[in-house]
Image: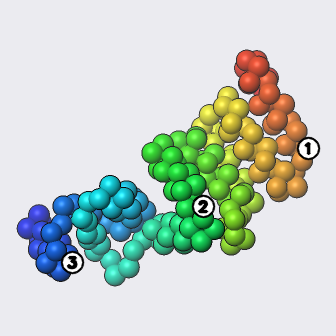
Amino acid sequence: MSVQEAARAAETAAGGADVEVVVVGAGFAGMYMLYKLRGLGFSTVVLEAADDVGWLAVLWNNLGWTYEGLGRLDESLDALERALALEGGSEAYRILAEIRLEAPYRDARSRVDALAMAQAAVKLAPNDPDALIALAAALTANDRAQEAILVLDRALARIKGDLNLN
């Protein structure tokens, strides 16, 4: 799509209203940007080539509405904002593992996904005590308490500064 075509599409989508910002793409990042820009008071419109928004945007929307219904939308958005800002690094995986373990509604919880995300966090940052603690929590949730104890010992050693303990 050319710039001129995008401008025409934005005018059509806006229905004649003044638009300050055009967000291209209705995936996770696009919907998140829409939320932040509108929160700052910008008049926005989203352009999406597909007939519907991306699956990550749908997931974000479902999670956001659930937390909002519980009065906890700020907590949800804060966690997702930190995960997005970290671009998939160790801390993002740890945060996402915590969300999968502690989600307030059953359908969003997944012990298996939490374990996979926590393992990814530890793989990316094997000396990070926070990642190790998240892994221990996920192991415990998956009925692997003996492994969790060993991981907690590693986390405690990291906190105390002993990087030689594996």
Give the mark nearer the N terminus: 3 vs 2. 3
Residue 51, by quadrant, is bottom left
Residue extending farthest left:
4
Q: Which one is in front, 22 or 156?
A: 22
Q: Are there few (<14), some (14-19), or many (20+) residues within 10 Å of tag 1?
A: few
> Can you tell which quarter of the image residue 111 is in?
bottom right
Are dots 3 and 2 in contact, CB under 8 Å?
no
- Quadrant where the C terminus is found in the figure: top right
In this image, 28 relative to 2: left or right?
right
Q: Position of residue 41 (x, y in %)?
A: 29, 59
Disc 3 residue crowd, few under 14, some 14–19, many 20+, Cα 10 Å:
some
Q: Which residue is mark 2?
A: 72
Judge from the rendering whether residue 41 lies leftward or rightward of residue 17; answer left or right. Answer: right
- Which is nearer the N-term, disc 1 or disc 3? 3
What residue type is disc 1 on? Answer: Gln
Residue at the image position 28 percent from the left and 69 percent from the top: 46
**Which residue is identified by label 1?**
146
**Measured Cα–Cα span from mark 3 to mark 2:** 31 Å
At a point 71% along the width and 58% down the height, the residue shown is 102
Residue 44 image position (x, y, % from top left) = 25, 65
Depth-wise, is mark 1 or mark 3 nearer the camera?
3
Q: Secondary structure at mark 1?
A: helix
- Location of residue 113 in the rendering, given as x and y in whole percent from the top left corner: 68, 59
Q: CA distance from mark 1 to mark 3?
A: 56 Å
Give the number of the disc on residue 13: 3
159, 117: nearer the viewer:
159
- Asked if one can make out residue 63 in the rendered structure from this viewpoint, the answer is no
Label 2, residues with CA under 10 Å away: few <14, some 14-19, many ≥20: some
Of the numbered discs in the image, which one, if any, rests on residue 134?
none
Mark 2 residue element: loop
